[in-house]
Amino acid sequence: MSYSTVYKDIGLKDYKETWDLQVEIFNKLVDHKKQGIVAGNNIGNNLSGELIFVEHPNVYTLGKSGSEDNLLLNSIQLRAKDASFYKVDRGGDITYHGPGQIVGYPIFDLEILNIGLREYIYRLEEAIIRTVGEYGVATSRLEGGTGVWIDPETPGKARKICAIGVRASRYITMHGFAFNVNTDLSYFNNINPCGFTDKGVTSLEKELGTKQDFDSVKNKLRLNLQKVFDLEWVNQ
């Protein structure tokens, strides 16, 4: 059975405001599970999952297992860069979000999907790999890491095009992925992305040599997420 999901593209939105929206949806699904109500089938009082697409103004976020040493700016330098900084409750280390990047927050019930967290992350990666592949760019996974990479095992050439960091409680997910499309990659110079000091970052624009149609990339990604998770779009 397909997983009933509400899709929301909320455009350019402040990070904290979007985090609060995630928490609201997340808590609603978790509360229903505590009450013994199965989420995701869109029948009666059951709740659908939600997939949020968003762009953020310049912001650095640090996962709960990350080190502040991987942020190479102080508070004054952050303000000069017109950037903000948040410690968050997802996995992973530090990353950057900004305009030209598709940030996706799937708030899904993994029990309804009948998958574990590792398979969930694998499928997120698969949707990105398929999307980038439609543009003729080969990507893959990095052994021992998360996200989607180009030349991941080639010293000096490994570069990440999509970062992934998630949280799950009672099998309900939040946070998600950040896919660089037309991203200003210079902002990554101010961090050790995801804690790596020997690997780079890239974007679809950089790999193809020209700015991409952002909405077209979003549509392709949305369809690939629908396929890999067997989603059925529903209205809220």
Image (cartoon, grey):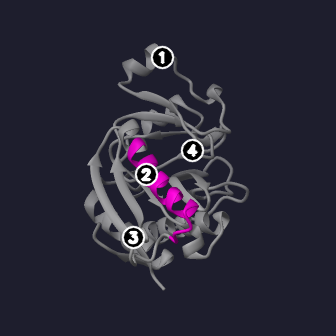
**Secondary element type, mark 2:** loop
The kind of residue on which mark 3 rests is Thr
**Secondary element type, mark 3:** strand
Q: Residues within 10 Å of mark 3 (few under 14, many from 20)?
A: many
Q: Which residues are magenta?
A: 20-38
Residue where numbered disc 4 is placed: 200
Q: Quadrant of residue 123?
A: bottom right
Q: Are marks 3 and 2 in contact (CB under 8 Å)?
A: no
Name the residue at 64% across, 57% down.
152
* Numbered circle sitting on residue 75: 1
Residue where numbered disc 3 is placed: 5
Q: CA distance from mark 3 to mark 4?
A: 34 Å
Name the residue at 57% across, 60% down.
34
Q: Earlier in the sequence, mark 3 or mark 2?
A: 3
Image spot of residue 6 (x, y percent): 35, 67
Q: CA distance from mark 2 to mark 1?
A: 27 Å
Q: Is residue 43 left or right of residue 138?
A: left
Residue where numbered disc 2 is placed: 203
